Image (cartoon, rainbow, N blue to C red):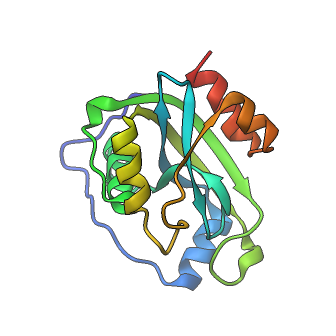
Amino acid sequence: MLSYKDPDFPEERIRLSDKEYERALLAFPIVCADVVLIDAERRAFYLADRIVHPVKGWWWIGGRIFRGEDPLEAARRKLDQESAVVLDTTRFRYIKMLRHMMTVRQQEPQNAGTDTIAYTYAAAVSVKEANQVSIGLVHSEYRLGSLRSFTREELHAENIRPQIRDLYDLVFP
């Protein structure tokens, strides 16, 4: 992924009210950066049990990119914010841009849905690092201690979301 930014690009960031954010969601896709943690030796994905919409259930870590923010830095930031674990960006490997159109969102009105375009990265972690992520998961978004590894067979047996199963085949061809 190539990104070009003028040297004097204004990176002002503003916070929208819930109503303004709802209108933005209805008008534009939101750009995100996601990172799936992997156990390269076992050929497994680490997923966490999310407790909030737009994705409840097994999912990777990530979220919205700020205006002017580099997607790779956003993926690193989201991992830090959501698990208190910081990995050097050299450990992240860009996989693919994915688009997720979800029916519901956390805020009212929940049926407004979300449409996100996500730069998706993979990062290999040790079992020790995976345990640190699991312990550090943000309780407002994930079931604490829920990080779990899934092999390809387990992803299919447990009917994990299709975009996760498809990404698995890109990460582990």
Residue at the outermost top position: 173
Q: Position of residue 67 (x, y in %)?
A: 37, 57
Q: Nearer the viewer, residue 47 or 30?
A: 47
Q: Position of residue 6 (x, y in %)?
A: 25, 41
**Residue drawn at x 56%, y 24% as measured from the top left:** 43
Say if 157 sits above or below 68 in the image: above
Say if 2 sits above or below 83 in the image: above
The N terminus - image quarter:
top left
Using residue 97 as the reference point, say whether residue 5 is left or right of it.
Answer: left
Using residue 20 as the reference point, say whether residue 88 is left or right of it.
Answer: left
Using residue 114 as the reference point, say whether residue 7 is left or right of it.
Answer: left
The C terminus - image quarter:
top right
**Residue drawn at x 78%, y 35% as measured from the top left:** 156
Q: Nearer the viewer, residue 168 or 15?
A: 168
**Residue drawn at x 28%, y 36% as measured from the top left:** 89
Q: Residue 73 occupies which quadrant of the picture?
A: top left
Using residue 7 as the reference point, say whether residue 169 is left or right of it.
Answer: right
